[in-house]
Amino acid sequence: MEIPEQQWAQVIETPRRGVVYKQIPVQQPGPDEVLVNIKYSGVCHTDLHALTGDWPLEEKSPLVGGHEGAGIVVAKGDQVTRVGVGDHVGVKWLNGSCLACEFCCQSDEPLCPEALLSGYTVDGTFQQYCVAKAAHVSILPKEVPLDAIAPILCAGITVYKGLKESGARPGQIVAIVGAGGGLGCLAQQYAKAMGLRVIAIDGGDEKKEMCLKLGAETYIDFLRSENIVHDVQGATTDGLGPHAVLLVAASEAPFQQAASYVRPRGSIVMIGMPAHAYLKASIFNTVVRMVSIKGSYVGNRQDGNEAIDFFMRGLIQAPFKVVPLSELGKVYELMGQGKIAGRYVVKIPD
Ligand code: 8ID
Ligand code: ZN
Ligand code: ZN
């Protein structure tokens, strides 16, 4: 296959002015890297944070965003033996890490101080040809549809890891806050596949219908509820609240509410990262109810393999819509307004 010198990409330019659809040069892979011809990429709310620059983490500029990329290896560096040209792979948020620090050694590579982040500190998957470290790409079986698998590569892995971090066991109840969004939809599917019962919390009837279809036992509309704490606890048979809360919303308010409705001994897992937000919880109640509050950040390579395996076994069927890469700007607009039920996936031009 001939690799062109120029390619189509969505670029966040310097200074920022939205995304610009334009031609840019194709990069060459380094010795430990692969060049991936991206076919589809999911659009994560993190990409919108990168576009607005509202996180306290410096990003590359100009930048090609995107970190849920599924495609085909078209070139590789001399040191790469793990994957070959023609293999189907996924490019994730964690584009690369040093593989040698304390965190990498204990399979916490998202915590690596030298981690490279796709679509944030290095160019990502909203382009036809993306460079990634060979050690970190996810190998995808060839029968996997590249559009449906794309959202698994960040959203799926992240919520699967978060559910594991929650410590919730089969039969227990998890409240998913932001359940109608990209991460939330997948969280409901993974939770069900892991034997958990789901309370879905989000806003509007479109998301309600979708959540109930995905298997949530209860849907609570945060736009209509007059007392979220009361409603969430009331959705559990004994009124004591859910055993775990997975916070995947992109706004601060629900983070403050969770500690009031989680079950004693329960856990709150923060995954959403609303800009400029802080967490406030009553110390007294957290202590005497023995509540755990923690953060969870994407997943390691094995979490990725496991999340893909759930998908391969047909357990994960979250809704997604496909639009051409040229329409990425419209997706960001809808996302900013909270109007996306499920995930958008962009089709990268051939
Ligand atoms: O590794 C991580 N921790 C990680 C990985 C991937 C994404 C973190 N994230 C972060 C993103 O950066 C973003 O901050 O998770 C957040 C959610 O990402 P997403 O699922 O891609 O966003 P979305 O599709 O826009 O969904 C967000 C949902 O939250 C709902 C919205 O209605 C939407 O459906 N929501 C909001 I905003 N406020 C809510 C509230 N008060 C709420 N739902 C319930 N109650
Ligand atoms: Zn993401
Ligand atoms: Zn490291």
Image (cartoon, rainbow, N blue to C red):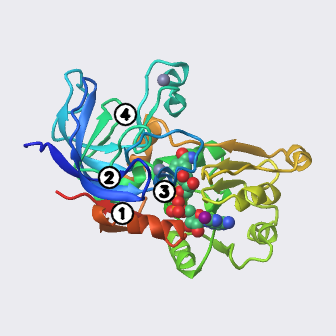
For label 4, the SS is: loop
Q: Residues within 10 Å of mark 3 (few under 14, many from 20)?
A: many
**Type of the residue with mark 2:** Phe
Q: Quadrant of the N terminus?
A: top left
- Disc 3 versus disc 4: distance between alpha carbons? 23 Å
Looking at mark 3, is its residue's CB closer than 8 Å to ligand 1?
yes
Q: Is the residue under label 2 in contact with that under label 1 (CB below 8 Å)?
A: yes
Mark before the other along the chain sequence, 4 or 1: 4
Q: Residue at x 43, y 23 (%)?
A: 98
Q: Residue at x 80, y 66 (%)?
A: 229
**Type of the residue with mark 1:** Leu
Report the front residue among 303 and 202: 202
* Residue, disc 4: 136
Looking at mark 4, is its residue's CB closer than 8 Å to ligand 3?
no
- Disc 2 versus disc 3: distance between alpha carbons? 13 Å
* Residue, disc 1: 328
Mark before the other along the chain sequence, 2 or 3: 3
* Residue, disc 2: 126
Q: Determine which of the numbered discs, if any, sits on residue 48 in the image.
A: 3
Q: Is there any visible trace of residue 313 in the rendered image? A: no
**Type of the residue with mark 4:** His
For label 3, the SS is: helix
Q: Quadrant of residue 180?
A: bottom right
Q: Is there any visible trace of residue 49 in the rendered image? A: yes
